[in-house]
């Protein structure tokens, strides 16, 4: 029976995150100083976890976020199924009152169950789920990998957590996140269970 523990994290902060600009699948941005600091804090907190494998998206901000683990010699694999949802024509564009309203309307559509809705040139939640299922099949097809680290993206992570827990994708907003926050999910051979929800303790540096 396959049993696994998945440590699922969102990538660290980028300048576009800081400026509130949507990135999506088409923006291959680097971590900024704060993002690199977050990566270091996460590594310090979890460097003793015996990860068997690391899975990341094809966007470099995910690899940069967990590079210290890769440097330990832990094998890693890039899966396009872990890429962020594509926001199409809005990626990298400065936020305006109009675009903010369009985003809010789209997310409302999704919450209302209109899961094929998307921006021009972008992806719908259903399209992202289709590629996530392929990625999950790959991750789950290696029973010897008991403890796995997955680094991905905010919106995509919400969708994956719906997929794992059997929720409708319309419930994606029930999974909050910030940069380099952790969701720890166990699989007992039958079902997935979130055992650590939106954990950011590693980012709280003591000032003492």
Image: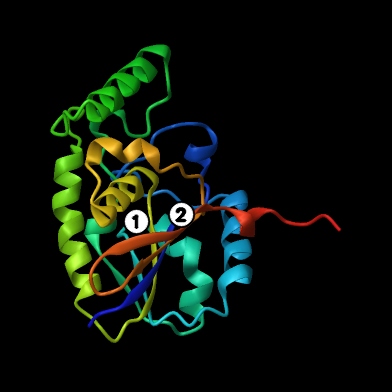
Q: Position of residue 178 (x, y in %)?
A: 51, 45
**Mark 2: few, some, or many residues within 10 Å (few <14, many ≥20)?**
many
Looking at marks 2 and 1 on the same chain, the residue that comes earlier in the sequence is marked by 2
Instruction: Give the vertical position of 27 relative to 181 (above or below).
Output: above
For the point 54% across and 37% down, the residue is: 18
Locate the C terminus and report the quarter of the image it occupies: bottom right
Instruction: Give the vertical position of 125 relative to 186 (above or below).
Output: above
For the point 56% across and 71% down, the residue is: 46
Residue at the disc numbered 1: 59
Q: Position of residue 190 (x, y in %)?
A: 23, 70
Tell whether 33 sits left or right of 194.
Answer: right
Tell whether 76 sits left or right of 138.
Answer: right
Q: CA distance from mark 2 to mark 1?
A: 10 Å
Q: Which mark is residue 74?
A: none
Nearer to the camera, 157 or 97: 157
Kindly indicate the quadrant of the structure image that contains residue 99: top left
Kindly indicate the quadrant of the structure image that contains residue 151: bottom left
Secondary element type, mark 1: loop
For the residues labelled 2 and 1, say whether their Cβ atoms are less than 8 Å apart.
yes
Q: Residue furthest right?
A: 208
For the point 42% across and 48% down, the residue is: 29
Instruction: Give the vertical position of 48 relative to 22 (above or below).
Output: below
For the point 53% across and 73% down, the residue is: 68
Secondary element type, mark 2: loop
Nearer to the camera, 144 or 79: 144
Kindly indicate the quadrant of the structure image that contains residue 92: top left
Q: Position of residue 161 (x, y in %)?
A: 32, 52
Q: Position of residue 9 (x, y in %)?
A: 44, 58
Residue at the disc numbered 2: 11
Tell whether 79 sits left or right of 71.
Answer: left
């Amino acid at each position: 029976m396959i049993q696994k523990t998945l440590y699922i994290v969102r990538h660290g902060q980028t300048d576009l995150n800081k400026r509130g600009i949507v990135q999506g699948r088409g923006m291959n941005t680097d971590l900024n100083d704060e993002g690199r600091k977050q990566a270091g804090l996460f590594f310090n907190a979890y460097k003793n976890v015996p990860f068997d494998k690391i899975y990341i998206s094809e966007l470099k901000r995910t690899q940069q976020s967990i590079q210290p683990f890769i440097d330990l010699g832990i094998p890693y694999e890039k899966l396009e199924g872990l890429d962020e949802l594509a926001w199409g024509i809005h990626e990298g564009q400065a936020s305006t009152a109009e675009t903010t309203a369009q985003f809010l309307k789209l997310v409302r559509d999704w919450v209302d169950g209109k899961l094929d809705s998307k921006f021009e040139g972008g992806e719908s939640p259903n399209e992202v789920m289709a590629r996530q299922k392929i990625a999950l099949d790959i991750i789950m097809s290696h029973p010897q990998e008991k403890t796995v680290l997955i680094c991905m993206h905010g919106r995509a992570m919400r969708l994956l957590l719906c997929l794992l827990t059997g929720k409708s994708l319309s419930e994606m907003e029930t999974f909050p996140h910030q940069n380099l926050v952790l969701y720890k999910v166990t699989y007992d051979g039958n079902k997935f269970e979130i055992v650590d929800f939106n954990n950011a303790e590693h980012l709280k540096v003591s000032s003492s």
